[in-house]
Image (cartoon, rainbow, N blue to C red):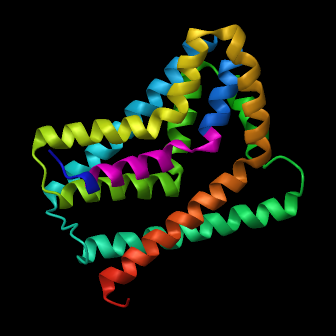
């Protein structure tokens, strides 16, 4: 069984991935629109399969290239510092845009209504594309694969850890979908309020999460270089 520290890191990184305001906002629009369970269900399934697939590819590449991911190794230290820089830039960008927009909803919210009306295949393709283009998500996928590689797990343990990470990274999408399936009349008003709150404060969530992760990964990178 993998150690508790590995579980803790996978759950933490997965939870950070799950807080994707763009995907949560798009899912809420789907659940409040026509044919919500079918369209929302396929959207969430594509999210789950994309996460599992990306992490599996990263693990396969890591094994084939014999990447070392122990603390202080060049690969892990380089990844930590690169991720910290990218996340710091993303967090500062969101804060600056929030300041410029004032009380207006973030710019990305104005695109979600158009995405939510796309035919299902295009909707899924757009969701996957946004997910793969997100630098914070990609670095979190890489970091999660890295800690699994560093733990030198068996194949079955890697499958289990990938499943746990994927579940943690999908909870914020799975819970609204399951809630709607269990009780539409009671849940719809809550989804509507959640959508309004997310559209007002989603960029603040992205900025705060990005800056917190940048600080943590930057510290890890400096530790790996022996500078602190």
Q: Quadrant of residue 159?
A: top left
Q: Is residue 34 visible?
A: no
Predominant secondary structure in magenta? helix
Residue at image location 56% in from the left, 11% down from the top: 181
Residue at image location 25% in from the left, 73% down from the top: 71
The C terminus sits in image quarter: bottom left
Extreme residue toward the left, this view: 154
Q: Is residue 12 above or below residue 184?
A: below
Q: Is residue 153 visible?
A: yes
- Point out residue 76 in the picture as x, y percentages from the top left corner: 29, 70
- Point out residue 112 in the picture as x, y percentages from the top left corner: 72, 35
Residue closer to the observer: 107 or 1 = 1
* Residue 95 falls left or right of residue 41: right
* Residue 106 falls left or right of residue 209: right
Is residue 11 a member of the stretch shown in magenta? Answer: yes
**Where does the magenta region start and end?**
6-22
Q: Is residue 20 above or below residue 216?
A: above
Q: Quadrant of residue 156?
A: top left
Q: Is residue 207 above or below residue 108?
A: below
Extreme residue toward the right, this view: 103
Q: Quadrant of residue 67?
A: bottom left
Extreme residue toward the bottom, this view: 227
- Point out residue 93 in the picture as x, y percentages from the top left corner: 69, 66
């Amino acid at each position: 069984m993998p150690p508790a520290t590995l579980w803790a890191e996978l759950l933490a990184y997965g939870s950070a991935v799950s807080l994707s305001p763009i995907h949560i906002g798009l899912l809420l629009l789907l659940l409040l629109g026509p044919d919500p369970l079918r369209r929302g269900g396929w959207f969430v399934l594509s999210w789950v399969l994309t996460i599992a697939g990306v992490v599996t590819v990263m693990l396969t590449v890591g094994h084939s290239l014999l990447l070392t991911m122990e603390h202080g190794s060049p690969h892990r230290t380089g990844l930590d510092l690169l991720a910290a820089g990218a996340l710091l830039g993303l967090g500062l960008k969101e804060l600056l845009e929030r300041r410029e927009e004032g009380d207006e909803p973030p710019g990305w919210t104005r695109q979600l209504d158009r995405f939510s009306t796309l035919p299902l295949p295009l909707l899924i393709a757009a969701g996957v594309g946004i997910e793969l283009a997100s630098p914070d998500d990609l670095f979190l996928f890489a970091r999660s694969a890295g800690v699994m590689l560093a733990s030198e797990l068996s194949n079955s343990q890697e499958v289990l850890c990938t499943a746990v990470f994927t579940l943690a990274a999908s909870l914020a999408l799975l819970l609204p979908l399951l809630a709607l399936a269990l009780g539409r009349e009671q849940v719809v008003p809550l989804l509507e309020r959640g959508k309004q709150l997310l559209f007002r404060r989603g960029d603040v969530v992205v900025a705060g999460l990005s800056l917190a992760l940048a600080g943590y990964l930057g510290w890890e990178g400096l530790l790996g270089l022996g500078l602190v």
